[in-house]
Image: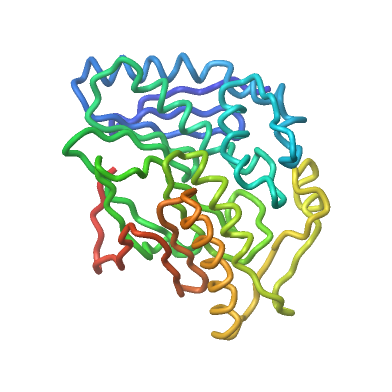
Amino acid sequence: MTRAVAALLDDGRLHLQHGPIDLIIAADGAPDEVAAGFGQARARFDGLLESLVRELPLLRSPAASHYPLAQDPVARRMVAAVWPHRHTFITPMAAVAGAVADEMLTALIAGRQLARAYVNDGGDIALHLTRGTSFRIGVVGSDVDAAIDGIATIDAASPVRGIATSGWGGRSLSLGIADAATVLARTGAAADAAATLVANACNTDHAAIVRRPAREVVDDSDLGDLPVTVSVGALAHADIARALDAGAAEADRLYRAGLIEAAMLVLRKQTRVVGRLALRAPPARVVGDP
């Protein structure tokens, strides 16, 4: 297994990377408090991947009627995040990036005086906010042009502390065709699991959609022989609308169940927004906060 890498970036953020885990960590506070928080994050990162790897058989198994007894703290976060969804097909791996972000944020802020902070694990983000602070987030609906399709401001009074995005063209496999399904929830792990389900539900049958068994795309995929999307060709407006409506229906179900706070789906620059948090179209030029 490769060695973990830690580096302080020129803009003052901390970069931690080990295998598939790639974190960008930022914090606002007195320099000594930030430095101490970064030290705590580095210490927690040591051995994190190895501990998760030891529990992979459990983490790649579908959630079932019995609650899995994970040992690793990140693994326990993953199990807890998918447990409410156990009546559909989902494994704890659906929450891995968000759970890592949550765990690392907890280590970062423990005992520290930090006004705000975040841990970004490849786009799945855990947030720390104190009174009077906020983050402005941009929702990017496509890896192709990286244009911002929506903006939301999250302040300390909001229950949102986790943001995650899933879709067929990202780093994770998807059963659906969403370019992006972004979910805002109370934790990163909860947002990650829910984004997976919302992206899976954003779907329709069409000859232009190509699917292959997951194990043919990634040989050790926890999805096994389930058909995952590998390409999406030209779709008519009605096909796009049908897929987005299906994804929005799943997001609305999760919202009504209290499992998410908001969601935004993007497919071919068309969108659907669910939840009480306002997601608005961006101005012509966006200058975003960290």
> How many numbered circles does the render carry?
0
Left or right placement of residue 9 versus residue 214 in this view: left
Left or right placement of residue 214 versus residue 86 in this view: right
Q: Nearer the viewer, residue 23 or 112?
A: 112
- The residue positioned 65% from the left and 25% from the top of the image is 52
As displayed, is residue 263 above or below residue 44? Answer: below
- The residue positioned 28% from the left and 65% from the top of the image is 282
Left or right placement of residue 261 versus residue 281 in this view: right
**Where the C terminus falls, by quadrant?**
top left
Left or right placement of residue 76 versus residue 220 in this view: left
As displayed, is residue 281 above or below residue 12? Answer: below
- The residue positioned 52% from the left and 55% from the top of the image is 254
Q: Nearer the viewer, residue 274 or 286?
A: 274
Q: Position of residue 129 (x, y in %)?
A: 27, 35
Q: Which residue is most to the left?
A: 132
**Where the N terminus falls, by quadrant?**
top right
Q: Please identify the quarter of the rendering in which residue 279 is found.
A: bottom left
Q: Position of residue 250 (x, y in %)?
A: 56, 62
Q: Nearer the viewer, residue 208 or 145?
A: 208
Q: Position of residue 153 (x, y in %)?
A: 27, 52
Q: Position of residue 10 (x, y in %)?
A: 30, 31
- The residue positioned 53% from the left and 34% from the top of the image is 99
Colour pattern of the rendering: rainbow
